[in-house]
Image (spheres, rainbow, N blue to C red):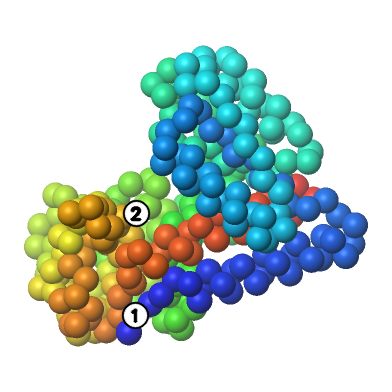
């Protein structure tokens, strides 16, 4: 079974459209996103264009605040504080990585948790690890869970292997799985007998960042494989799994492109809605 991201993203899109329509019917301000971009990295600009396009289609408002690549910490924090204090801004997205002169730790502590749509704030991170759903979780881990739920996988009691231990993906995702009463093993580059762990798991999430690294021998016929990797092999986008042999063997897989990334993009915008509601409380 191919676990495509588009139907999942479309479901989230419909939820956003309903919320936007509710705002219009009740004379409320429309959900508003501020994108804070440092410099002019081509991949940032391309990502920004996709977000702006999606916001326009959904009836949301998005604005870009661009600052110079050489901006110092004091001035950057001043720009961020203006967005924090602007009641018309519901969500703030800071493009990363940032230049070396900008301290990510201080920035993460400065962004208002209720406007932090990409889970930079330690307040939101703590809520994820405490199983508190009132915060805003990282978009990609949430996308993984949404895909599995959409395709009606019962996560209770399932053995899950997550091949990533970062604070962006692996660790918060493990917490979200635990919140669904799954049993989680976090794997990484130093894990011994990795193929044995993954082939015995019911669900495997690959986030190793190695194009076509995981062949069919890492999985069993019952494996549900969620591929979070985005890599380029011979200038062609691919995931972490060697797709064709794995798809032939495993019970279900997500494609790359067209899988997790598609859902992540829509969850990011849904977080603007969630942020707006948090600020209304």
Asked if one can make out residue 119 in the rendered structure from this viewpoint, the answer is no
Residue pictured at 23% horizontal, 52% vertical: 235
Residue 64 at x, y percent in the picture = 62, 37
Q: Is residue 1 left or right of residue 151?
A: left
Q: Name above or below for residue 152 compared with residue 216.
A: below
Picture quadrant of residue 53? bottom right
Query: For residue 170, which numbered disc appears in the image?
Result: 2
Q: Name above or below for residue 81 compared with residue 233.
A: above
Q: Nearer the viewer, mark 2 or mark 1?
A: 1
Picture quadrant of residue 249? bottom left
Asked if one can make out residue 95 in the rendered structure from this viewpoint, the answer is yes
Mark 1 burial class by Cα count in 10 Å: few <14, some 14-19, many 20+: few
Q: Is residue 190 left or right of residue 280?
A: left
Residue pictured at 66% horizontal, 40% vertical: 63
Label 2's element? Answer: helix
Residue pictured at 15% horizontal, 60% vertical: 213
Q: Earlier in the sequence, mark 2 or mark 1?
A: 1
Query: For residue 150, which numbered disc appears in the image?
Result: none
Residue 217 at x, y percent in the picture = 10, 73
- The quarter of the image holding the N terminus is bottom left
Name the residue tied to disc 1.
Answer: 2
């Amino acid at each position: 079974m191919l676990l495509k991201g588009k139907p999942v993203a479309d479901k989230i899109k419909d939820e956003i459209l309903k919320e936007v329509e509710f705002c219009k019917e009740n004379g409320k301000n429309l959900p508003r996103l501020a994108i804070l971009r440092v410099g002019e990295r081509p991949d940032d600009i391309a990502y920004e264009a996709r977000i702006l396009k999606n916001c326009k289609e959904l009836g949301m408002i998005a604005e870009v605040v661009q600052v110079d690549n050489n901006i110092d910490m004091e001035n950057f924090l001043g720009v961020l504080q203006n967005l924090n204090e602007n009641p018309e801004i519901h969500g703030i997205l800071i493009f990363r990585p940032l230049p070396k002169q900008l301290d990510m730790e201080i920035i993460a502590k400065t962004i208002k948790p209720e406007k932090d749509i990409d889970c930079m704030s330690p307040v939101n991170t703590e809520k994820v690890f405490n199983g508190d759903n009132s915060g805003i979780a990282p978009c990609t881990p949430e996308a993984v869970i949404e895909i599995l739920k959409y395709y009606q996988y019962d996560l209770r009691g399932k053995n899950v292997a997550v091949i990533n231990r970062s604070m962006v993906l692996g660790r918060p995702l493990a917490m979200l799985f635990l919140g669904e009463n799954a049993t989680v093993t976090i794997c990484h580059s130093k894990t011994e007998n990795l193929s044995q762990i993954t082939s015995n798991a019911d669900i495997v999430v690959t986030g190793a960042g190695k194009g076509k690294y995981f062949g069919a021998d890492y999985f069993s016929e019952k494996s549900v494989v969620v591929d979070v990797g985005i890599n380029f092999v011979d200038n062609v986008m691919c995931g972490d799994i060697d797709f064709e042999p794995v798809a032939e063997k495993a019970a279900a897989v997500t494609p790359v492109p067209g899988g997790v990334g598609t859902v992540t993009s829509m969850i990011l915008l849904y977080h603007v809605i969630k942020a707006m509601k948090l600020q209304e409380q």
